[in-house]
């Protein structure tokens, strides 16, 4: 997402990263990778579990992309790192 951030911005989509790490760790990670979007801490894996982004063991996150509209409706969900074109196609 970092490298395709302009495509998301043009589509008026705000990406977020979510994982169980703490806020300080997120700050260091975001700075190191120069992430142009916020990272949210989910230490109890509540959001991660709610959106189906847990590994089979239920204890670790699986890299996933979920596109949610302002009403909370899931428009797109996929494991892995699909590109902006695939994700944003759910808006049309």
Image (spheres, rainbow, N blue to C red):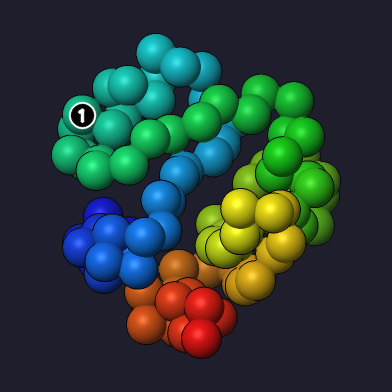
Query: Is 21 rendered above or below residue 69?
Result: above
What is the x, y in percent for residue 16? 45, 44
Q: Identify the residue at image location x=40%, y=20%.
A: 25
Crowding at dot 1, Cα within 10 Å, few <14 / some 14-19 / many 20+, comes out as: few
Location of residue 18 (image quadrant): top right
Residue 62 shows in the view: no
* Viewer-side residue, 1 vs 72: 72
Residue name at image x 41 percent, y 51 percent:
14
Q: Position of residue 84 (x, y in %)?
A: 36, 74
| Left or right: where 27 falls relative to 62 | left
Q: Nearer the viewer, residue 1 or 14?
A: 14
Quadrant of the rendering where the N terminus is positioned: bottom left
Residue drawn 71% across the image and 53% down it:
72
Number of numbered discs on residues: 1
Identity of the residue furthest to the top in this view: 24
Percent position (x, y) of residue 35? Answer: 25, 42
Is 21 above or below relative to 46? Answer: above
Q: Quadrant of residue 7?
A: bottom left
Where in the figure is residue 6, as x and y percent of width and height? Answer: 21, 63
Residue at 18%, 39% in the rendered image: 34
Residue at disc 1, secondary structure: helix
Residue, disc 1: 31
The vertical placement of 61 against 5, above or below, is above
- Residue 25 visible within the image: yes
Decide which of 83, 14 is in the foreground and name it: 14
Q: Is residue 27 left or right of residue 48?
A: left
Horizontal side of 11 relative to 19 (left or right) equals left
């Amino acid at each position: 997402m970092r490298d395709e951030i302009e495509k998301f911005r043009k589509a008026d989509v705000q990406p977020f990263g979510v994982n169980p790490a703490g806020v300080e760790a997120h700050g260091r990670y975001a700075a190191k990778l120069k992430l142009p979007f916020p990272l949210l801490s989910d230490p109890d894996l509540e959001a991660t579990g709610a959106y189906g982004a847990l590994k089979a063991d239920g204890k670790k996150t699986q890299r996933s992309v979920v596109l949610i509209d302002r009403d909370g409706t899931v428009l797109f969900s996929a494991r892995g790192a699909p590109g902006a074109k695939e994700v944003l196609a759910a808006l049309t």
